[in-house]
Image (tube, grey):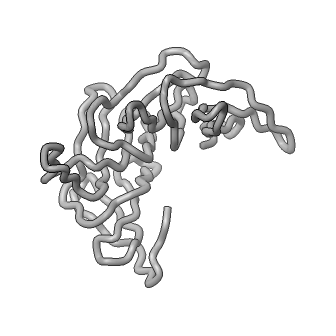
């Protein structure tokens, strides 16, 4: 993920058998790793920057469970945002930096006692209150959330009609709209 100013790139890579979060400075045809974060996690995936470029949010795995994490761009203040048994993947920060859209297996019908988890759905994590809200009325497998520039809707990939296509959830109308109708399906 590029930083908001386009001068840095956050990505994960392997080092000594573990995922490591890197920040690379990118200037023209020159690129140089300027920071490496050796995290106390088994894996780190899908980094995304806050709009001010001060922090990086990502999905990380510890003990086989994935949660959302945040770290300052200078490597300080490493924080676990979600802390439960549900899988939390593919985080994307809202344009105002107060919310994170992500894919998760939490939702109606989830039962760890019965080993029953729903297909991935899109949820929103509110950073100030640390609350999680599932988008309503989701069907099928839902992945790859992306915020609209105005923060009033989220586009995502869903196979709710049998083929993966792009849908949009509008927060004002509280409705889902199918945007594409690709016969072969669409991926993130």
Left of 16 or right of it: where is 58? left
Q: Is residue 107 above or below residue 23?
A: below
Residue sitting farthest toward the top: 76
Residue 81 in percent (x, y) is at: 36, 28
Q: Is 93 in front, or is 85?
A: 85
Residue 100 in percent (x, y) is at: 38, 39
Image quadrant holding the N terminus, namely top right
Which residue is depicted at the point 51% across and 43% down? 46
Which residue is depicted at the point 86% across and 44% down? 29
Q: Quadrant of residue 31?
A: top right
Residue 178 in percent (x, y) is at: 34, 72
Q: Is 182 in front, or is 46?
A: 46
Left of 155 or right of it: where is 135? left
Q: Is 169 in front, or is 64?
A: 64
Total labels drawn: 0
Which residue is depicted at the point 29% across and 54% down? 121
Left of 45 or right of it: where is 125? left
Q: Quadrant of residue 17?
A: top right
């Amino acid at each position: 993920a590029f930083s908001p100013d386009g001068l840095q790139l956050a990505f994960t890579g392997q080092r000594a058998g573990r995922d490591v979060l890197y920040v690379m400075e990118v200037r023209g045809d020159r690129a140089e790793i300027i920071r490496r974060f050796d995290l106390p996690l088994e894996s780190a995936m899908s980094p995304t920057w806050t709009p001010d470029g001060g922090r990086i949010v990502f999905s990380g795995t510890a003990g086989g469970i994935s949660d959302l994490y945040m770290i300052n761009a200078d490597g300080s203040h490493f924080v676990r945002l979600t802390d439960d048994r549900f899988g939390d993947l593919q985080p994307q920060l809202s344009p105002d930096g107060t919310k994170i859209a992500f894919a998760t297996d939490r939702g109606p019908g989830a039962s760890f006692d019965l080993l029953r988890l729903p297909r991935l759905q899109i949820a929103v994590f509110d950073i100030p209150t640390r609350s999680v809200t599932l988008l309503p009325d989701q069907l099928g497998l839902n992945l790859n959330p992306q915020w609209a520039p105005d923060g009033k809707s989220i586009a995502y990939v869903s196979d709710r009609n049998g083929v993966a296509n792009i849908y949009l959830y509008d927060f004002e109308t509280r409705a889902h709209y199918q945007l594409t109708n690709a016969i072969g399906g669409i991926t993130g």
